[in-house]
Amino acid sequence: MEDMIKGNHAFAEAAIRAGATFYAGYPITPSSEIMEYLSVRLPEIGGVFIQAESEGASMNILTGASASGVRCFTASSSVGMTLKQEGISHMADSYLPFLAINVVRYGTGLGTLDTGQSDYLRDTRGGGSGDYRTFVLSPYSLQEAVELIDRGFELADKYGMGTILHTEAALGQMMEPCTFPEMKKVERRHGSIDGTYSFERISPLYRDRLKEAIDEKAKYDSIKENEQMWAEESLEDAEYVIVAYGLAGRSATGAVKQLRAEGHKVGLIRPITLWPFPEKAFAKVNKDVKGFISVEENATGQMVEDIALTLKKSDKSSKPVYMFVDAFGVPTMKKIKANFIRVKNGEIKEVY
Amino acid sequence: MEDMIKGNHAFAEAAIRAGATFYAGYPITPSSEIMEYLSVRLPEIGGVFIQAESEGASMNILTGASASGVRCFTASSSVGMTLKQEGISHMADSYLPFLAINVVRYGTGLGTLDTGQSDYLRDTRGGGSGDYRTFVLSPYSLQEAVELIDRGFELADKYGMGTILHTEAALGQMMEPCTFPEMKKVERRHGSIDGTYSFERISPLYRDRLKEAIDEKAKYDSIKENEQMWAEESLEDAEYVIVAYGLAGRSATGAVKQLRAEGHKVGLIRPITLWPFPEKAFAKVNKDVKGFISVEENATGQMVEDIALTLKKSDKSSKPVYMFVDAFGVPTMKKIKANFIRVKNGEIKEVY
Amino acid sequence: MAIAKKVPEMLSKQISFCPGCGHGVVVRLLAECVEELKMEKNVIFNVGVGCYSLATPSIEADKFDTLHGRASAVATGFKRCNPDTLVISYQGDGDAYSIGVGESFSAAYRNENITVITVNNTNYGMTGGQMSATTMPGQKTTTSPHGRDCNTTGMPIKFPEMVAATFPNAAYVARGSVTTPKYVNQLKKYILNAFKAQLNNEGYSLIEVLSPCPTNWKMTPLQSLERINKELVDYYPLGEFKTRKEK
Amino acid sequence: MAIAKKVPEMLSKQISFCPGCGHGVVVRLLAECVEELKMEKNVIFNVGVGCYSLATPSIEADKFDTLHGRASAVATGFKRCNPDTLVISYQGDGDAYSIGVGESFSAAYRNENITVITVNNTNYGMTGGQMSATTMPGQKTTTSPHGRDCNTTGMPIKFPEMVAATFPNAAYVARGSVTTPKYVNQLKKYILNAFKAQLNNEGYSLIEVLSPCPTNWKMTPLQSLERINKELVDYYPLGEFKTRKEK
Amino acid sequence: MKKVLIREERCKQCGICVDACPKNAISYSSEINLNGYQPVVIDDDLCIGCGICYTMCPDWVFEILGDRG
Amino acid sequence: MKKVLIREERCKQCGICVDACPKNAISYSSEINLNGYQPVVIDDDLCIGCGICYTMCPDWVFEILGDRG
Amino acid sequence: MKEILFAGLGGQGILTSGLVISQIAVSKDLNATWIPQYGAAMRGGTANCTVKFGNEMVYNPAQEEPDILLAMNNPSFQKFVGMVAPGGTVVIDSSLVTCDTNVREDITVIGVPSSEMAIEMGHAKGANIIMVGVIANVSGDITEEEGISGMNEMFRKKGKSKFEEMNTKAFKLGYNFKK
Amino acid sequence: MKEILFAGLGGQGILTSGLVISQIAVSKDLNATWIPQYGAAMRGGTANCTVKFGNEMVYNPAQEEPDILLAMNNPSFQKFVGMVAPGGTVVIDSSLVTCDTNVREDITVIGVPSSEMAIEMGHAKGANIIMVGVIANVSGDITEEEGISGMNEMFRKKGKSKFEEMNTKAFKLGYNFKK
Ligand SMILES: Cc1ncc(C[n+]2csc(CCOP(=O)(O)OP(=O)(O)O)c2C)c(N)n1
Ligand SMILES: Cc1ncc(C[n+]2csc(CCOP(=O)(O)OP(=O)(O)O)c2C)c(N)n1
Ligand code: SF4
Ligand code: SF4
Ligand code: SF4
Ligand code: SF4
Ligand code: SF4
Ligand code: SF4
Ligand SMILES: [Mg+2]
Ligand SMILES: [Mg+2]
């Protein structure tokens, strides 16, 4: 039997178990417990813990660690993640893997301390310059977070790019039991910078950008093809499909179960990879579906764009997409259900 | 008869003519001539010119100026704009108007010096945290840039939000003649901070975020309804519509003219507001249109998402969207035409 | 009967710091000095992010909440647009010396005609007492659980000393404390000096204040004051590092 | 016949700076010192963004191009992961003292065991000669067209002096020049000192180099050297500001 | 005679004034204020109106009566 | 006797070595190298192999023959 | 599934009460979540947390409609009593909750003078543990033994077993409190 | 619409040549654009710019298929000759372009020893202006008077009229150069 553990502590421990030995970060509510935990834990395993002067610096410190081939990570929250965008895009351009945990807090600019999902578009499209992408993984429970952190490191290494664990204040702050895997030992990545000049790094000034553009696109296409992850409920006969991720997805899972029990033909897609977006899940949905409902913890609706884009390129291009956004806070099952009924009754206009 | 003038100089002069009296920035190729010009010009008109220690600082200096009610602006390029995202989102959250000129250079991270359009998604969705938007205006000529800079300031003031003039290295560096309006005198905005405590600013800790979320969404919806700008060619009978902005849009304008002359039923939508995206232009397109072609200067296709989203919510949701991206550089008319022919011949698969 | 000592008008609302927190004294002193200089209607309180963010609702004067660490940059914008207004940049050790060290350093370097008040409570109060650039050697915080190890994290920073030594044109630099009546009165004089320097266009002024954070120090308010008087002032000497040139 | 003075092996390719640019000398000296210490296969050249970015293709050793201003942070990552490797952070005055001043300051503050070389050519060479934090009073640049006005932009920064005065544990701090044979030889000694300090785990070392930028100064190479010798060294004195403690 | 005004609702019972008062004139009330603290009370007989409590209180509880200076 | 090797293709005709040579042994060739510069030539009779040209040249043009030191 | 809301002043140990209940549930192999309040009020003031447990997975871990409310002061009672599920129970510290608690017909209010009881038993800081006992009983899902062993094991693992005896006593007091 | 590519070494004044041509076109009320090269080579090395002008708006201002190429050194000739439109013209500085220029049948190559001519006329830095004259003539759109007045006005506005006489002479030399 496992003990209750706080989300942020679980994230930190999961990264340690996944073989990460290097952390640099800067405190910010509601993610600070990650680094507080690591300030004890990393020295125990002989790893490196650096409290940097800022989020930006911590990302650049990570750049040196990742270029050295060391499994490394950072964590922050929304406005703090904004400051990491410069480093994230530079690491993307340098093909350097990393894991960054965004314990999202609701709001623009400084934001609030409330739980929310208002960084979806930024994290899936990238807040830095250029065409890069990172993996964006979103857990709905601590157990799933533990697994996704391991998976996130592996994906990052496999494709030479970054992974964002995109989670919410509420998951970072809540407690529930979870199981950790054994400690993994990870070697320094091959072909990394260690002073021995084992390979020649081409200067950014002389890289073949056209070839890289083509390669990047191909790589992203192959990731879209191969790395989608999601959970689903009752898609085969669904008249409506609710789409929600993270804790909204968890609440929606319960809502869908209850609605089914009440006789409603409703299904659920819970994206686990926000990028690549789980388009394949939508292909499994019953052709006669009447519509999709995006449930999000933000002000304007963000993931709804990916739902609409997915449908646009499928045989369901004419299916309406509805949206239920409630600014911040985990949407209650009650509200999700009520909203579903309103959609079903034609009381809500589609957004796409 | 007007003289040849360099794009960056024209942008700077246009801002001065529009009544801006405050600039803070940090040099970066290919935008530096803007601040070089202003280092001469602003003192001449009694304005303030600050070379800040960084792009981030310059955006925060602007925050103080805008909160003081002064018409203010900054300029940078891609990676430099990344560093302004923190300030941009904070100004958005503080309802502070500003103009930021992004002379886009191609690429991720540090990027290159090549001209490109790889910041579309970042600039239209915001690279900071939260649900905010800024106006994103993209000119295809220096004359249009001059006009959009004035318009950008006015829109920013009207809605209490930011405007990004999203242009390209090539437009900043090229020369062509253009006409400037007379100098405009702009008063300090009403209800600004000037030390007299003329109004009470509510602390971010005590704002009614739920109400604001609803208000913001309504404001954005009303902007989408009222402030779309675009140019178009021959949409009524078009079999295919090319969509391109900025210099790609300019090149496409020529390509479409030539294709028409060659007997092809092709139309053009050239978005001028990238946000709000000119959805209304698409409504004007012939119902029997066979497809849309997005022409962009980037690696993976970015605006294509907005085209697909626009179609998804229209009666053209089943119309295919094709894409022609060539990484960096202004796409030649020749290539645009060749690509159109390939689409027409069914040699290219749609992306949406 | 007249009132000899009166909480400034602009502070008519209660403040929500922890019991014994030093921020309350600093805010009051700033307001007192603004009042004495009759600048109540010509002042901008520009505030960084830290526990002092809780103070802005209680200050009835022009005020602005900046991003974390950026207050000195924002203050620059305010001052350049309002050259005759008293611009105060209120920050913490975390805000001013870590994430904002670039902005703090550069405002001093440009010799911006603003007054920066940095409340040094040797940790990040608001976020739960993490180590800051001023955390003392051996001090336990939530990110230096075994006590600060200066071999890997550096020695605590003395920013006022640095400014005084590095920026020849800076107008006024001092460090005060809120731990005894004498120190409080002395701090008030420092603040008045800094404000006068600014109003006289003499350039950048900076005052660091040693201030207790009983909550995160896990001490009673009185123990906190004692810690400052016994431990901190040795490392962070009080006094003026740069006095006004008579003008 | 033997070769008495030989361009280091790792610099086998031509370098593409402007004629007379001082960066070439600095890069060569670094490589010479690396070679003398036999660290060719145990060194990381970590390079900021400025004209020196043009040098990495010519350096045949482990190297990394960072973002503008972030080199000292990236170097921190390298050093912590490669504690026995010589980590050199090559930066310019723009890179290290303006956009990167937070990272530069904080690496010094943490006393990272790295060697930072800052090439001070009193402007932003790469982007066309804009004013930097080291531009001299009255110096004309593309953003100080009438000559630098220190009343609004501040006095040029003396970073090495600041580091020496502010960070008690810093291992070694000096300023050199490439303008005469004597200075070049002296600079080489400084670099060797810094490298030895790092290899001996003594902590942070910093060397600023006064270096000509004939192109943006709009001078001939010889005039540029003369400008440094006549004008700059008075303001930016050469020498060691912090010498190694004998260990 | 009253020399000091007290805004009880603001007191957080931090004890700083109690310690600082040169005349030991300050103690705690047995009442509890809205924030759950027992606010200070002053013994007017002991109090000399020196103002030290005003100077030291972080919660703007006191005002000192009398002429300025 | 040759005391100095020159990689002509690297010379950018900056003039620094010409000025620094204590023996005025350096002048420019009349040929133009690939970069469009007239590279340096050394008058072996004047040259004393002091290495100052090596020390000062920013473009890694010279190598000095002889034993180290 | 049970949803319990614990609310009170900062120093009253309310978050710990919730955690103990959730850990007891876990020790019974139930699913459980614990989630603290969010918001702007960081310094002092009120605190609350929501605990949910049951056989099924806990879907929404956040506060939805509490079956049981523990209110340790007046503001907490007033703020949250309206949210309690019809038929639910409100446990109040009757030494501290002095306002009118007769505000809803469809809920049961149980007054427990836990602060006084704690002082009486010589464990002044133990009011929150007394309340854990009360809640464990009221929830109907937890036997006295399960509660005590779950609680003690939790404190033991945290290296805080020195209060074990006191805690056990306090828990029992609460569990067996007769209204 | 005419597209002209000006290419040479950094110091040869190639960007100015292009600018003068574009300004002359503008002075004739034509539409014109001027755009310099981009890329990573910032220090020294080659430079080039593309000028387009005509009655219609200039759509793509960037290099597409030059009608005329001015090549002031070997690398410029070699790099760009293949891009010239069929039937187009290449003007070379025959004092500096020493490579084989007989590489395409469908274009005309005009050799002008502008560097030598410039030295001869005592205005060593005027080779680029001589070439402006040549291009103005070759383009077929610009009369000698239009060229001279457009050019001189441009320099005058920039406050650089002191070379007016020399420039005029150089322009004329180029305009009237007989192959
Ligand atoms: C970009 C960003 N990073 C981190 C934070 C989180 N944060 C808020 S306050 C603070 C520290 C404040 O410390 P200090 O300035 O010393 O103020 P104190 O609370 O100690 O008075 C931090 C890290 C933030 N708000 N924004
Ligand atoms: C974020 C960012 N801002 C601006 C730039 C543009 N930039 C490149 S190099 C440079 C200045 C370099 O100056 P310095 O470090 O002094 O090097 P120098 O070229 O003078 O040797 C600038 C501003 C950039 N690359 N990235
Ligand atoms: S946490 Fe510390 S600094 Fe913040 S209000 Fe409480 S005592 Fe003051
Ligand atoms: S611009 Fe200046 S610093 Fe850059 S390479 Fe040329 S001379 Fe050197
Ligand atoms: S005024 Fe002086 S004597 Fe009176 S209570 Fe206050 S501190 Fe004590
Ligand atoms: S100092 Fe103020 S808050 Fe503290 S006990 Fe005294 S009156 Fe109360
Ligand atoms: S070695 Fe000495 S003498 Fe010979 S050419 Fe070089 S500098 Fe002159
Ligand atoms: S110093 Fe070097 S580059 Fe300069 S002239 Fe002499 S050999 Fe040529
Ligand atoms: Mg602090
Ligand atoms: Mg420089």
Image (cartoon, coloured by chain):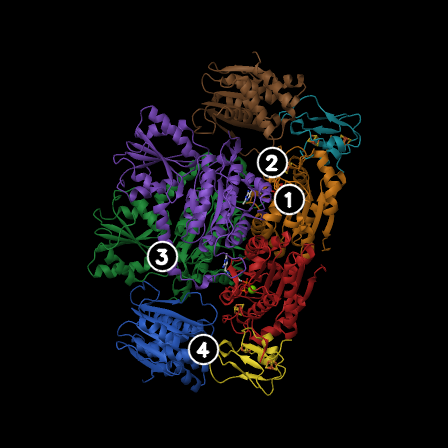
Chain colours: A green, B purple, C red, D orange, E yellow, F cyan, G blue, H brown
Q: Which residue is mark 4?
A: E34
Foreground: disc 1 or disc 3: 3
Does residue A56 lie above or below D144 as drawn? Answer: below
Q: Which residue is mark 3?
A: B214
Q: What is the quadrant of the C terminus of chain D in the image?
A: bottom right
Q: Are marks 2 and 1 on the same chain?
A: yes
Q: Which residue is mark 2?
A: D58
Q: CA distance from mark 2 to mark 3?
A: 57 Å
Find out whether the residues at labels 2 and 1 contact each other: C-beta distance under 8 Å.
no
Mark 2 crowdedness (10 Å alpha carbons): few <14, some 14-19, many ≥20 = some
Find out whether the residues at labels 4 and 3 contact each other: C-beta distance under 8 Å.
no
Find out whether the residues at labels 1 and 4 contact each other: C-beta distance under 8 Å.
no
Q: Are marks 4 and 3 on the same chain?
A: no
Foreground: disc 2 or disc 3: 3
Image mark 4: chain: E
- In depth, the one of D195 and C133 nearer the eye is C133
Q: Amino acid at mark 3?
A: Ile
Helix, strand or loop at disc 2? helix
